[in-house]
């Protein structure tokens, strides 16, 4: 399974659409078997969920995300985890142990409305 973390370097980013990169982890039997970093190709409404789907991503982890992106991920059966913080790899390890839960926090009515 492929899991992506919206990141700034190796840290989970607060704003999905404006992340610097996506750290992508391939997992098998609840272990990381491969990892890579892919630069964010640019924020355009609806683009990034489709981009990540095309890469085979099944789970996306981020600090925050807009409702439009969440809806597109849900349509593509990609699990969305928001509210994550800290080191990207540590969040993957928590997820694989079943210990990382989404806060359900979706970006609304703040300075980044429509941009997350």
Image (cartoon, rainbow, N blue to C red):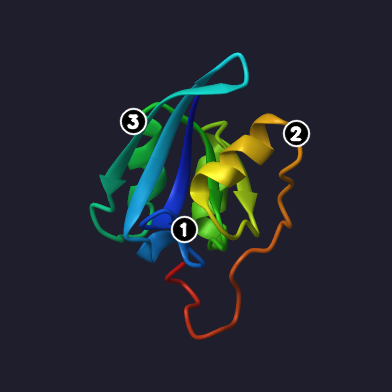
Q: Are marks 1 and 2 in contact (CB under 8 Å)?
A: no
In terms of depth relative to the viewer, which is nearer, 39 or 34?
A: 34
Q: How far apart, in angstroms, are the residues tagged by discs 1 and 2?
A: 20 Å
Say above or below: 27 vs 96: above
Callout 2 touching callout 3 (CB < 8 Å): no
Query: SS at mark 3?
Result: helix
Disc nearer the start of the sequence (1/2) = 1
Label 1's element? strand
Residue at mark 3: 54
| Crowd class of label 2 (few under 14; some 14 to 19; many from 20; radius 10 Å) | few
Residue assigned mark 2: 98
Q: Residue at x 30, y 61 (%)?
A: 43
Residue 94 is left or right of residue 15, and the answer is: right
Query: Counting other residues with Cα less than 10 Å from the Cα at mark 3, is it few (<14), some (14-19), or many (20 or more)?
Result: few
Q: Secondary structure at mark 2?
A: loop
Per the rendering, the mark at residue 25 is none
- Name the residue tied to disc 1: 11
Camera-side residue: 50 or 79?
79
Q: Is residue 97 left or right of residue 36?
A: right
């Amino acid at each position: 399974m492929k899991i992506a973390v919206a990141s700034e370097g190796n840290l989970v980013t607060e704003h999905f659409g404006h992340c610097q990169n996506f750290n992508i982890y391939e997992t098998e039997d609840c272990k990381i078997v491969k990892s890579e970093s892919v630069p964010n190709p640019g924020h355009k409404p609806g683009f990034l969920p489709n981009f990540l789907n095309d890469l085979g991503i099944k789970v996306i982890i981020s600090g925050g995300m807009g409702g439009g992106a969440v809806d597109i991920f849900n349509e593509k059966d990609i699990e969305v985890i928001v509210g994550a913080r800290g080191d990207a790899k540590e969040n993957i390890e928590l997820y694989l142990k079943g210990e990382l839960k989404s806060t359900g926090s979706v970006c609304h009515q703040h300075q980044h409305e429509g941009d997350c």
